[in-house]
Image (tube, rainbow, N blue to C red):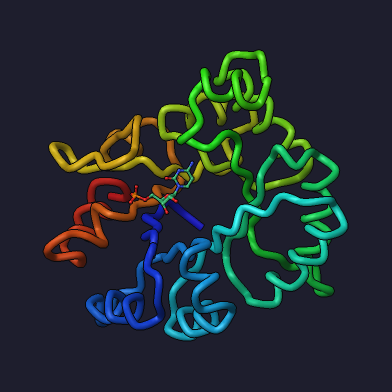
Amino acid sequence: MGKDVIVACDFDSKEKTLAFLDKFQGEKPFVKIGMELYYAEGPAIVKEIKARGHKIFLDLKLHDIPTTVKKAMAVLSGLDVDICNLHAAGTSRMMEAALEGLTRPDGTRPLLIAVTQLTSTDEEIMQRDLLIDQPLDKVVMHYAKNAADSGLDGVVCSPLEAGKVHQVCGKQFLTVTPGVRFAGGDVGDQKRVTTPEKAKELGSDYIVVGRPITAAEDPVAAWKRCVSEFCD
Ligand code: C5P
């Protein structure tokens, strides 16, 4: 898969999601389904969006004991999504178990990527709440390296970290990056943002874009603008 824009469908119902996707008519944007929509509608919404011809990043961020994550990943792999994810904080053993669970009998599997530190966690919070007494960027790179060594395909990170992740984990290791805004656009609750163009320059492989597209007056035009700034 080449560079692409993944649209975060952060809606709380099937109706709202399908009404949003209907606007795209012949176009099939890459869709991210997160906890809100998945917990509201379950596997049926994944199947429905897949049947409409979209690629899907199922963003459920698993984190549990290795056996539980392995079994859960085996179930998710049956949904035929393109990308799944988990928390690297679950340890290398958990990530290896997840890959085993995700791999189908014929050897195929969705891509598996890891969340390092959430972008809502800054260094002070990490040190105070998690007692991780290290600089945030060192922790992010350590988790990324653990994910790469465990056989995962990439990480979710800030576009600002994409270059360093590629240096540490290799060019092929995917960087999937939220925190994207158009120049002059509303930042919302994202702390460190970059434009699609800047994310491309910094080496992101995929950008995850929610509100700049879902809340736009013309979501299709906003998506096309993202694609042309990031992919062309
Ligand atoms: O609306 P916005 O563009 O901020 O949406 C970004 C999407 O990326 C949301 O679905 C959010 O949950 C997700 N995300 C994030 N930061 C992370 C991981 C995921 O913003 N570190």
- Extreme residue toward the front, this view: 129
- Residue 125: image location, x then y, percent: 53, 24
For this view, does 98 lie left or right of residue 185?
A: right
- Residue 168: image location, x then y, percent: 63, 25
Q: Residue 19 occupies which quadrant of the picture?
A: bottom left
> Residue at 78% across / 41% down in the picture?
150
Q: Is residue 105 above or below residue 206?
A: below
Q: Which residue occupies the foreground of this view, 97 or 110?
A: 97
Q: How many numbered badges does the structure rendering display? A: 0
Q: Residue 49 occupies which quadrant of the picture?
A: bottom left
Q: Is residue 144 above or below residue 54?
A: above
> Residue at 82% across / 60% down in the picture?
68
Q: Residue 76 occupies which quadrant of the picture?
A: bottom right
- Residue 120: image location, x then y, percent: 46, 35
For this view, does 80 lie left or right of residue 201?
A: right
Q: Is residue 158 above or below residue 138?
A: below
Q: Which residue occupies the foreground of this view, 57 or 111?
A: 57
> Residue at 36% across / 40% down in the picture?
179
- Residue 200: image location, x then y, percent: 35, 38
> Residue at 16% across / 42% down in the picture?
185
